[in-house]
């Protein structure tokens, strides 16, 4: 063995996967699935019977959780599908900047300033109106596969 120390440049993250495998036949309606590298919520599942030489197939109809687009996929029921890790976190709304970014208060007292206002018109107007009236608002942020978006709003009373 040599006496000199080995130094390795590490460019890897902690190794936490953005998805996990799940058998296609066990994914149900209102579950999550990855279709075309997009995290989706399943709205319809139908299973076809096996053919003469084949597997039963699952037909998934799902809606992208961030942009609302409808996607479809057909997978043999015995094969694995990717299922995204989806987390929801509540943050208190502090400020809305002119360029469409929101400033949020995290649970440990830090601020999070890298989120844009949602594109959904009704949610956007609820946030802007509530903030304009000086209400104390808590927004729910859904995050999956490296993307984050405001998906819900709660009013916790006046400031």
Image (cartoon, rainbow, N blue to C red):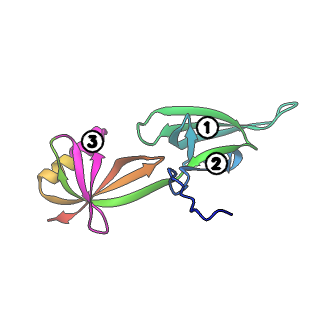
Q: Which residue is mark 3?
A: 122
- Single out the mark in the foreground, 3 or 2: 2
Element type where label 3 sits in the image: helix
Task: Quote the CA–CA distance across marks 1 and 3.
Answer: 28 Å
Q: Which residue is mark 1?
A: 60
User: What residue is at 30 percent from the left and 38 percent from the top?
Assistant: 119
Q: Which residue is mark 2?
A: 27
Q: Nearer the viewer, residue 109 or 126?
A: 109
Left or right: 119 as drawn, with respect to 129:
right
| Quarter of the image with the C terminus in it | bottom left
Q: Earlier in the sequence, mark 1 or mark 3?
A: 1
Task: Quote the CA–CA distance across marks 1 and 2.
Answer: 9 Å
Q: Earlier in the sequence, mark 1 or mark 2?
A: 2
Please tell me how crowded label 1 is: few (under 14), some (14-19), or many (20+) other residues with Cα within 10 Å: many
Q: Position of residue 97 (x, y in %)?
A: 17, 46
Q: Position of residue 158 (x, y in %)?
A: 15, 64
Residue range (magenta): 99-126
Up/down of 52 relative to 28, above or below: above
User: What residue is at 38 percent from the left and 48 percent from the top?
Assistant: 148
Task: Quote the CA–CA distance across marks 3 and 2.
Answer: 31 Å
Up/down of 72 relative to 25, above or below: above
The answer to which image quadrant residue 35 occupies is top right
Please tell me how crowded label 3 is: few (under 14), some (14-19), or many (20+) other residues with Cα within 10 Å: few
Q: Position of residue 60 (x, y in %)?
A: 61, 37
Q: Does residue 29 appear in this view?
A: no
Labelled pair 1, 2 in contact (Cβ < 8 Å): yes
Left or right: 50 as drawn, with respect to 89:
right
Q: Nearer the viewer, residue 27 or 79?
A: 79
The answer to which image quadrant residue 61 occupies is top right
């Amino acid at each position: 063995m040599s006496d000199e120390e080995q130094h390795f440049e590490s460019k890897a993250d902690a190794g936490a996967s953005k998805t996990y495998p799940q058998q296609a036949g066990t994914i149900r309606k209102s579950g999550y699935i990855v279709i075309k590298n997009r995290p989706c919520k399943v709205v319809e599942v139908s299973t076809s019977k096996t053919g003469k030489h084949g597997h039963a197939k699952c037909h998934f109809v799902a809606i992208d959780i961030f942009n609302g687009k409808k996607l479809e996929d057909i997978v043999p029921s015995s094969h694995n599908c990717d299922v995204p890790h989806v987390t929801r976190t509540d943050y208190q709304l502090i400020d809305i900047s002119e360029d469409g970014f929101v400033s949020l208060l995290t649970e440990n007292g830090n601020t999070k300033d890298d989120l844009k206002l949602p594109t959904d018109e009704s949610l956007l107007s609820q946030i802007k109106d509530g903030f304009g009236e000086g209400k104390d608002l808590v927004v729910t942020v859904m995050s999956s596969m490296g993307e984050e978006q405001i998906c819900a709003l709660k009013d916790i009373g006046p400031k």
